[in-house]
Amino acid sequence: MADKYDLVIRRGKVFTPSGVSEADIAVAGGRIVALGDLADIKAEEVIDAQGLHVLPGVIDTQVHFREPGLEYKEDLASGTAGAALGGVTAVFEMPNTNPSTTTAEALGDKLDRAKGRAWCDHAFFVGAAKENLNDLAKLERLPGCCGIKIFMGSSTGTLLVEDDETLLSVLSQGSRRIAVHSEDEYRLRERRKIVEAEGASVHLHPEWRDVETAVNATRRLLDLARKARRRIHVLHVTTAEEIPLLAACHDLATVEVTPQHLTLAAPDCYDTLGSLAQMNPPIREARHRDALWRAVSQGLVDVIGSDHAPHTLEEKQKPYPESPSGMTGVQTLLPLLLDHMHHGRLSLERLVDLTSAGAARLYNILGKGRIALGYDGDFTLVDLAARRTITNDWIASKTGWTPFDGREVTGWPVATIIRGHVVMREDALLGSPLGAAVRFAECL
Ligand code: DOR
């Protein structure tokens, strides 16, 4: 055992691969160095976690932080501040910034910008484009890169790989798991007239980007991935119809759902939130939400990502379809899931699998995703009984809003600890932004 400890967390209910039991945890040099009854040891900092659960640090594998290019919506400092306040210890950020992250220089620029400004650990996706096709195998292995992202359907930004030929070429470069936004661009173009008609309302969003739009793309994607023998990760799955397709291909495909698709349903969300509920792929009717919950409980879903995609309220208030798609989410991911757990929709074991272990497993993250000896000292301390109300005031995003404003939840993150540093306690950021790049087995 080390003779000097930086942090000891005492008497929390600690979630380890062996189960949940009361234990102390000691961290030195950023790593977990002792677990168990550590009553006799001393440390620089001691946290009394009695009554709290100590979970592996939450990893959000889908956020859009807008830097560089659209910093008026969000930047790496504000986005990661929201993450830390929401109990998130690491984020994977998407490439649809301006410029898009499609080169080694753009990736390096993001990593540089994050230094000394990011409140949590981070990695960045490289976007697949026709221009960088031949570089993808090299790009995906650069330090700080979590993998390649494909947009099959256009959303915010200019990244797009819509045709089968280019998709197959992308899937044939490199070997890491590729993350995909699966909506069929051809069908989106064909159906765009639905929302361009006079008086179109946001209620038509799931009509334009309909079930077939998602299913067609996922079917094509699975066929192409099979041909290329490439592992893929299907982001924000939204339809009941995709579930059996994905279940039949679990050898190739992992699955993400978002808290908003598990929480909201059409048409109510559009009645009450208008275009604040507009995102791609859309929030759909309750039968899809129910199917996503079944996929969560039956084990098909691997991770929950927030798809944090901030746009200002002013932009969101533009008349549909000019209103941009996306909503904040990194800060509310965990409170919403804890509340769903309180209502019996998932167990604590499932929640941890979806928010930390799942991410580590599918992206081959080193040193994160579980509380275990030698792993990073990343912890999310939660009070499962705390009753709180989510409000816009609490949201650190520059856009200052959440679609869940006013929602009461049971369960709340009360501390965020990253490599032994306490960066959030009782809704306040502490210390300084010390986020570092996440490490991956495939980038060693
Ligand atoms: O609604 C969305 N917004 N979906 C996406 O795929 C992109 C995101 C954004 O960046 O705004």
Image (spheres, rainbow, N blue to C red):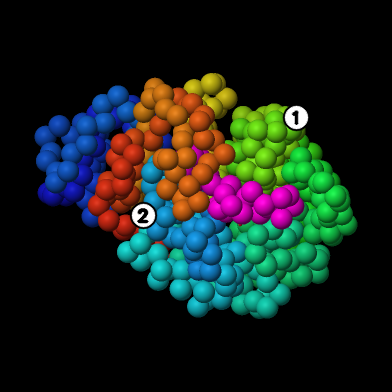
* Residue topped by disc 1: 287
For the residue pair 128 and 13, the one nearer the viewer reads as 128
Corner quadrant of residue 16: top left
Task: Answer with left or right where residue 132 lies relative to residue 124.
Answer: right
- Residue 289 within the magenta-colored segment of the rendering: no
Residue 436 is situated, as x and y percent measured from the top left of the image, at 36, 61
Q: Specify the segment rendered in magenta.
A: 310-334
Q: Which mark is residue 251?
A: none
Report the residue at 64% width, 37% height from top. Answer: 273
User: Is residue 438 in sight in this rendering?
Assistant: no
Q: Amino acid at mark 1?
A: Arg
Is residue 297 visible in the rendered image? The answer is yes
In-image side of 217 versus 279 (left or right): right
Q: Is residue 320 magenta?
A: yes
Q: Which mark is residue 119?
A: 2
- The image shows residue 53 at horizontal and vertical percentages of 35, 30
Tell me: residue 293, above or below residue 253: above
In the rendered image, the vertical position of residue 444 relative to residue 212, given as above or below: below
Residue 224, horizontal then vertical, whole percent:
78, 60
Mark 2 burial class by Cα count in 10 Å: few <14, some 14-19, many 20+: many
The main secondary structure of the magenta stretch is loop
Figure check: 134 above or below 260: below
Query: Residue at point 51% right, 44% down?
Result: 401
Q: Secondary structure at mark 2?
A: loop
Tell me which numbered mark, 1 or 2, is placed earlier along the sequence.
2
429 to the left or right of 186: left
Q: Amino acid at mark 2?
A: Trp
From the Cβ of disc 2, is ligand 1 less than 8 Å away? no
Measure how far apart labels 1 and 2 are at the Cα level.
38 Å
